[in-house]
Amino acid sequence: MLIVECEQGSDAWLQARAGVNTASNFKIARSRKKGGDWSEDALNLAFGTAIERESGFPLNEGHETWQMRRGREMESDARIAHQADIGVYVKPVGMVLTDDRIFGASADGWIGNDGGAEYKCLVSTKELRTTLINHDLQQYMDQVQGNMWLSGRAWWDLGVYCPAMKAATGKEFFRWRFKRDDDYIDAMVADLMEFEKLVQSNLAELRKLAA
């Protein structure tokens, strides 16, 4: 495991992510059509990852959506709310990478020696409804278990931070704690290794274009 100490959204953070299959994309990397072929999103992700890995630079040149910017700007507030909720310090972390730098994750925080944190600063009514009312947390599971796989940690807190919810519920922070699931991780890693073959195939095609 490698740790790159950097602030999320910084140039160092963007550089550390270039060509890396990150936990936020693990769900896409595993996605397939009904017949078993790769989904369009997975194909596009593999091609973009190959370009970044060959060039050594972020393909989007640091572009971030307003949702990404909002999450980055509110992360420290979410961490403070989390600390107040559990009563212990949450340590900011940069990028966590495998030794070969093929896989990685931007861990939002580490808790003691065994735990970690992922924050979702949601504003979409659909995401808030499905998460808080329907309790649909499966959409975040690859990222949560992926962080535990990469860090070797035993549990992870998933926190939803939304100040607008405080007027309606009296709370702006909601939290779920998940234990490490090695069976889930083994199945996920097997899928990610198959995806890596797709990235390698794209790398070969890029090198043909350069020949």
Image (tube, rainbow, N blue to C red):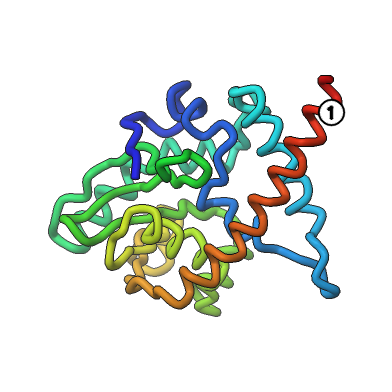
Left or right relative to 13: residue 210: right
Left or right relative to 70: residue 209: right
Q: Is residue 28 visible?
A: no
Classify residue 93 by image quadrant. Answer: top left
Relative to the observer, which residue lies in front, 149 or 90? 149
Q: On screen, 152 above or below 16? A: below
Q: Which residue is mark 1?
A: 208
Figure quadrant of the N terminus? top left
Q: On screen, 7 above or below 86? A: above
Residue at x 65%, y 22% (from the top left corner): 55
**Mark 1 closeness class: few <14, some 14–19, many ≥20 residues within 10 Å:** few
Q: Tag 1: residue type?
A: Lys
Figure quadrant of the C terminus? top right
Q: On screen, 79 above or below 3? A: below
Residue at x 30%, y 48% (from the top left corner): 109
Left or right relative to 118: residue 101: right
- Point out residue 152 in the picture as x, y percentages from the top left corner: 31, 59
